[in-house]
Image (cartoon, rainbow, N blue to C red):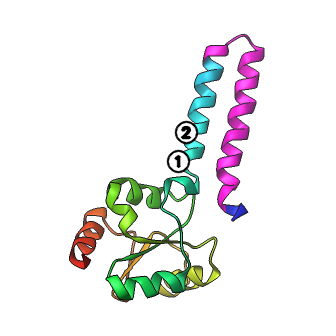
Amino acid sequence: MTRAWILPMLLVLCGSALATGLIASGAPGAATAVLLIFVVLAGVNSPLVFPRSIGTLEAQRRSAVDGRPVVFWRPGCKYCLRLRIRLGRSAHQLHWVDIWRDPAAAAVVRAANDGDETVPTVIVAGEPRTNPDPAWVREQLSRST
């Protein structure tokens, strides 16, 4: 869990250091803007933007019951973020699994991607799709409901 927060914490620390330097040089307005930008970047790259992650086995069980896709992701991944944002509210209907929190999830992703931990990897009915188009994911979701 700590690993998922490393990038957001680094962004806040760097933004704070830059803002402190700008305040010292007499530019409090610029310092506020820089700090705000870094805090927003930290928020976007944090696990807070994504629906709550569940374990691999639980996601697979739920997917078998309701037919919804399972999305394997990791914090800081710009492609995962793109998928999450483009799905909008429908993203909460998917089963999200953070591969940094669940070693079994990382193993599933490696098995689907020839040993690479390439995310997002979406599994629908046992078939993996790596970095799929958000429209395709939305289509798969509408088929399952």
Q: Could you tell whether 32 is left or right of 51 in the image?
A: right
Q: Which residue is mark 2?
A: 40
Mark 2: which amino acid?
Answer: Val
Res 47 visible? yes
Seen as rendered, the residue at the extreme top is: 26
Give coordinates of residue 105: x percent, y percent: 56, 80
Mark 2 neighbour class, 10 Å CA radius: few under 14, some 14 to 19, many 20 or more: some
Position of 76 relative to 145 (above/below): above
Q: Specify the quadrant that holds the C terminus.
A: bottom left
Give coordinates of residue 12: x percent, y percent: 68, 40
Q: Specify the quadrant that holds the N terminus.
A: bottom right
Disc 1 element: helix
In this view of the protein, which residue sits in the foreground, 114 or 89? 89
In this view of the protein, which residue sits in the foreground, 129 or 124? 124
- Marks 2/1: CA–CA distance: 6 Å
Picture residue at 27% right of the left edge, 66% below the top:
138
Q: Which residue is mark 1?
A: 44
- The image quadrant that residue 14 belongs to is top right
- Part of the protein shown in magenta: 4-29
